[in-house]
Amino acid sequence: MVPTANLIIKMPLRLSVSDLESHIDRHLVHWHQGGPSDSSLGSRPREEPDVVAFDLRACEWIHPSALLYLISFVVRRKAARKTTNLLLPSSERARYFLEAWRFHDAFLAAVGESVASVCVGENRDFFEFAPHRENPYAGHWVDGPFGEDRLLPKYFFEISTFKRQFNLFDSSLALSESARWDRVGQVLRRSLAGPANLLASRIIFEALLNAVRHPAADTIQIVSFMQRSRAGGTFTVSVWDDGIPIGRTLKHAAQSGLSIAPPVDLQLRASYRRLLGHAFQKERRDGGIVRSTDIPDKSATEGDFLLASVFPGTTRDRRGHGPVPEALDDARSDVLAQPGMGLFLLANTAVAVYGGVVQLRAGDWNLKLSKPPHDEQPADDQDFGDTCDAELVDYPNWHPFNGNLVTVRLPLRAGAV
Amino acid sequence: MSAPAAGHQGTYLALPIRFGPASSEAVSPDRVRFYGRLASSALRLPSPRHVSDDVQSVPITLTSLHENGRLSLYGTIEASLSNAELAIDLLIIDAMFRSAGASFDQNNFVPGRLQLSLAMALRDRHDEGKIIPTVLLFDEHPQDEDVVCKLLQPAIDDGKLAIVDRSGRITGSLLSSEDANLAVGSLDGSAVKQAQSLLHQKMIRRVGHFRRKLGDHMECTRYFYDGSRCTDEIRALLADFIKRRQPDAKLILYDTTVSRWLQAAADETAVQLGIGSASLSSLLADRDTAKPLAEDRAVLVLPLVDAGYSLEALFRRWHDLLPDTPFPAIASVMCTVTDVPPGMPGRRSLPIKPHSVEVEYFLGVDRGLRRTPTCQCCALKMPFSSFEEEDFDLLPAFDFWELVEAHAWIDERDVPDARATIGRSPDFREVFRDNGAWLASVALRRIRNEVDRLGNFQAPFVLVALDELGSEAFARAIALLHAAASVVLIPRPSLEAFADGDYDLDFLVAAFGAETPRWFLQLRDTEPRTPVIFAEEFTRSGSTSRAVARLVLAVRRSVVSAHTLICDFRPSERHPDDPPIRLALYEFELSAPEAP
């Protein structure tokens, strides 16, 4: 029997982050249309139901990144004293999948209560009996540079959670984690378009270091997944933190009089499109070329600041890091060695080297960086800059996303893994 | 570069960058020979004998990755390059960490920022016109789109820089492709030897009461070999075996009936070589499942060959189902040996009528077989041990005393001044030689479980030990299983100043003389928040651990988080200056020794 809830959000057979987001959006729009009379699209903050149930019963396949999104959603609602329930998949296979990725541990670590306590409906007691020894997807122990790691079949780590009060929350964490992930890079090395070691040493390292440095981040979660097809496939890694959205951080810094300008023009260029409206009302606007010297002014949107964070060194001043190390007087040296390089290096590695996509969901905005079509790339890259397409999406009609979710998708070449 | 005149002696400086350790490390002779080959080729000299070397490893610590200006990674690199003697003919910067066949080692996770910092430093020197001919060694070649490549391109275009990667691929005109390949190829042979040595050191020989079916009867064994920490070594050796014995293999077959750890190594070798892997016993279930075996060449890898019963069963099953298909070449991670000492690789011929089958093994071992009628553990009604996991946090008394009784007791070595000798003592050096990986794995598990901050996050820690046989052996064995652990060896005389609470760091430093000892720099410069663990073989009065705790507090301004040891002879005693956590693998209350 389906429990009582103000809103039941039914999830599809295959559930990805974008599916999750569009289903939330769609259900909330419908709820509002029949909901409180003062609610209208575009007005904020919007009312949200006191009790929401995520109905995963139809799900046969769930992308692990969607689990991070789901957790972030529950964390936000819990902070707003709202109740979120889960209806677990009817498919045993899908439930085993959730268990194998340690969804219950990740949920407990981030939300602070057991997933079993929010499960309702037919399979609500599934996690009370975890772990199930018969789970065919359960991980096995392997040795790693820091000791044992648990790997799922196909060499993926379960969702890892780091809490500020328990872990060394600095570059040591990023370093240790990137060491673990080197194994994944080596497994994928025949399929990646670039050197395998960059997966761990740039993408994981930079993504985690960014997360650690986001103000107020107390929880970080990381997960990856691979989808193979005859033509190749995709490897995805997602890192979520519950800190202040980076666009808001930068905007606040600018409004406080701090400089967020990179000290030199590194000639990173980007064209961007801004899409306004929710999932059903997209308005396209060409933003044209954006240079690293085009720093948003105080009145710019958080989206503009989010875009600016792609440029190297932009975020360096937020926490008081000086622009030039004492021992150095070459500003350019400082730019690449110091903080604020995270998104730039992620973009360079994931987009320029691997030909992949970087997506940053933070606050009201989603920023997607991808390689422009070949015929739109400039003939001469000045200095060592790159060109990428940046697509900004604004979600003005929904509660801001809780924290920062960075998703890196790398294309895989055809071949055995 | 023009060829030098006959008799010219070229000079190079090699800067091997090594991550983790706090101070400069010795570089292996193999590596120095490799540099010599590269240098003689780049300098167009007839042989490595014509170059004179200077090798100074560049330690990169965690601190270097922090954002503090002076300690930035770029600053470290820049300082090393500035120190390079201007009169040298060639600079070799070694950021090639991966050994042949290995997936990763402790250096391999150096962030991309190292490459980036190197590229920037070289670019800056090039822009200033100060760059000398440089060979840059990376594990993998940066892509054209990589910002690293873009930074380095001007120096490459000017013929001042060559990049060589682990596969021998080269960019730049300093070296020919053949020279680079030859030099890099010389590293492969040493990598296999290194893998053999590490396999021996890291193979965990669990001691317990293991019972399994052997042929048509049950056997008890005292040992179960757990290779779960040796995945990289097995992969390197298996890949080498396949390249030598069956280069056209399309499938790796494995048998994990008892030793499930083998599957990860077999799978990852298959991934590395781009071939398939499968469990042989599952393929031999029936004729349909066995079909792929007739189509592709395969190799079989076994965890351990003892009497050969399991292999014989597989062999007969194979020939029942696939009478026309030859049995695959066989590698075994281990093989019991009786006529040669354990610890070495070798070959063994097993008679399986009407044939004999040859097995190449990577490590000879002693199985510790105990036939049921004479099994002491059975006689004592000891429960059977699990093959999957350790049964106990501490060593059972029966196991501990068997380990120490396996070797003659010796007069206690390295007795602290603060107490009298306990007289005869177990020979822990010998105990470690046979059981180091197992004792270390049990100790490591307890450290992880009980030391704050090391549970969820498997962070680096500093292992402090005395520069003495037993203590050092224990610390090294732990560090071998936990690559992020840095071992710092303190000479006992340096503890004298810390024998009681009235210690004086200045007194210690003044005694150093002209050269500050390496252990002091290591201890002082490691990441301040990294937990420190003190390792020793046993404690009697606790005076040593307290002195170490005081010394660490004085040098690092941090406490010793835990004291790990094999045997605690004073489990009921606690002193305020003791490290807060004592993690002994065995506890035994020793009555106070009489004065000598």
Image (tube, coloured by chain):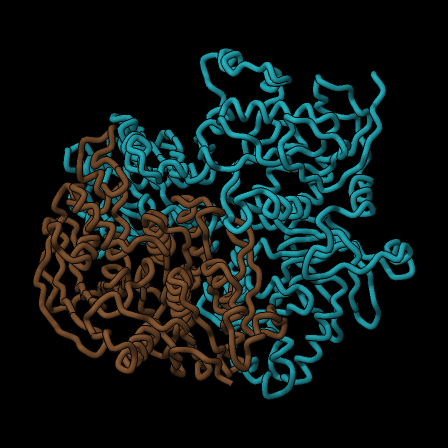
Chain colours: A brown, B cyan
Q: Quadrant of the C terminus of chain A?
A: bottom left
Instruction: Specify whether B140 is left or right of B419.
Output: left
At horizontal 71% and vertical 52% (from top left) the residue drawn is B206
Q: In the rendered view, tell whether residue B47 sits above or below residue A181.
A: above
At horizontal 86% and vertical 55% (from top left) the residue drawn is B377
Q: In the rendered view, tell whether residue A330 sits above or below residue B172.
A: above
Q: Residue furthest front?
A: A37
At horizontal 18% and vertical 77% (from top left) the residue drawn is A281
Report the front residue among A154 and A222.
Answer: A222
Q: Residue furthest bottom?
A: B288
Residue A155 visible? yes
Instruction: Specify whether B117 is left or right of B280.
Output: left
Please state the horizontal and vertical placement of residue B12, each as a whole percent of the image. 32, 32
Residue A233 visible? no
Q: In the rendered view, tell whether residue B183 sits above or below residue A325.
A: below
Please state the horizontal and vertical placement of residue B429, each as a whole percent of the image. 70, 35
* Picture quadrant where residue A329 is located: top left
